[in-house]
Image (spheres, rainbow, N blue to C red):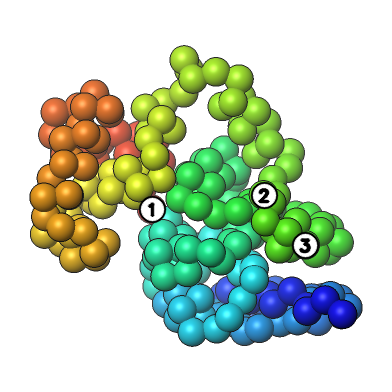
Amino acid sequence: MRAPIRVGIAEDHAITRYALVRHIGMQDDMVVAGEAGNGAEAVQLARSVEMDVLVLDLMMPGTGALDVVRTILARAPRLALLVFTNFPGERYALNVLRLGASGFLSKQCQPDEITLAIRTLAQGRRYVRGEVAELLATQAAGTALRPPHEMLTRREFQLMLHFARGESSAEIARKLSLSPNSVSTYRSTLLKKMEVKTASELTHYALVHGLLD
């Protein structure tokens, strides 16, 4: 018999979390592995509990949305992360997928769709639909119209957000377990790829494109 899919639930609204736990608990092939009610608890859950899929509310108290995604995947890079949110896909979907999330789903979905998404992620595949699928299709159609940040690697995008928030090279090196020389090299590469000259210009770009919380 195949082991059940271990699912974590990170959601700050108690009623929504309760409904998710009950719905997932009713599935024969799933088990709720743990719960979290804010960003810090979600990070701790990902670090301390064995899970196959983590269903993550994008906006929870305590930590910025992109910071939570980035930190969780740094702690548990093999974890399949399903972002579950009321926020518009055109603003956040490509950014969280670029950071390594495996799926993006609106809270307006039907109950059966979230279990379908969980099963899809547990099989090692991505799950997106509707406007997010259209965004990805548009992105794949050609690179000429894509903004510079969408041309970055996952690691470069991660570093860009740190620089855009005004963090020093030493701070970034410590947080990401990189050498200062590596961070300096990334900085030079980023400035060139983003066609800017200073970290302040990176900050302006990130704010204009809605990349910072």
Q: Which residue is mark 1?
A: 213
Q: Position of residue 106 (x, y in %)?
A: 69, 53
Residue 17: which quarter of the image? bottom right
Is the residue 161 above or below the residue 48 in the image? above
Kind of residue at badge 2: Arg
Q: Which residue is mark 2?
A: 126
Q: Position of residue 91 (x, y in %)?
A: 52, 41
The residue positioned 69% from the left and 77% from the top of the image is 6
Cα–Cα span, label 1 and label 3: 30 Å
- Mark 1 or 2 closer to N-term? 2
At mark 1, the secondary structure is: loop
Residue 119 has which mark?
3
At mark 3, the secondary structure is: helix
Q: Kindly indicate whether the residue at mark 3 contacts the one at mark 1 (C-beta within 8 angstroms).
A: no
- Mark 1 or 3 closer to N-term? 3
The residue positioned 53% from the left and 47% from the top of the image is 97
Is the residue 70 above or below the residue 6 in the image? above
Residue 67: which quarter of the image? bottom left
Kind of residue at badge 1: Asp
Cα–Cα span, label 1 and label 2: 24 Å
Q: Is residue 64 visible?
A: no
Q: Is residue 199 left or right of residue 2?
A: left
